[in-house]
Image (spheres, helix red, strand yellow):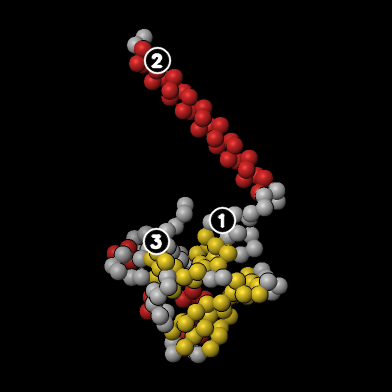
Amino acid sequence: MNPNRRLFTAGLAALGVSAVAGGAIAAGKDDDKAKGGGKDKGKGKAKHKNGKQLLGDKIKKNGKHVLETSGANTVSVDVKDGKITGMKVKHSKKGELPVTKYKTTTKMASADVLQYASMQQVQLQQLGTVYIGFAYYDEYGYEEIYWYPYDMIYDGDTGAIEYIPVY
């Protein structure tokens, strides 16, 4: 057998073993956090919600409107002249939670209506529509993001950071 071929095969085998061992070690760390052994809760996957649908016709009335209550958290938005001026999340014991403002051109949340692929308007989604999301982390480490079209937000993308989804 060719010495280069042997070296290549041995290197490939070593790479495979290290990849499997690295995955097992990483899985052990996650299991430790799941059992409560880790100090840090970590950050989980994002839960995308359609804020426009949750708000509905309340956008026409000025004031504070509660979108939903999720566990101990109450999510509300402030509306002024038909535009959202901000979102607040209040924990029943901890008080106000920090809210992050995101922007993206990809539609991250859709209505809870079944649509066939042939019926979706894919082209309209990518023609410059900007979505603004308000996010917070719940007590389990999941990021809850409420998405709105740009034109529903009072100050648009001021203070918003570009959203990069983590898969």
Residue 89 circle label: none
Residue 88 x %, y %: 56, 77
Question: Which residue is at 52% across, 77% downward?
Answer: 87
The relative height of residue 153 versus residue 117 in the rendered view (above or below) is below
Residue 44 circle label: 1
Q: Residues within 10 Å of mark 3 (few under 14, many from 20)?
A: few
Residue 6 circle label: 2
Question: Which residue is at 44% across, 68% downward?
Answer: 102
Question: Which residue is at 34% across, 11% downward?
Answer: 2
Residue 4 x %, y %: 35, 16
- Of pointers 2 and 1, the one earlier in the residue sequence: 2
Closer to us: 37 or 71: 37
Q: Which residue is mark 3?
A: 116
**What secondary structure is marked by label 3?**
loop
Q: Residues within 10 Å of mark 1 (few under 14, many from 20)?
A: some
- Report the amino acid beneath label 1: Gly
- Report the amino acid beneath label 3: Tyr
- Report the amino acid beneath label 2: Arg
- Of pointers 3 and 1, the one earlier in the residue sequence: 1
Marks 2 and 1, Cα distance to the nearest angstrom?
43 Å
Question: Which residue is at 55% across, 37% downward?
Answer: 23
- Of pointers 2 and 3, the one earlier in the residue sequence: 2
The relative height of residue 70 versus residue 62 in the rendered view (above or below) is above
Marks 2 and 3, Cα distance to the nearest angstrom?
52 Å
Quadrant (top left, top right, bottom left, bottom right) of the N terminus = top left
Residue 102 seen in render: yes
Closer to us: 113 or 3: 3
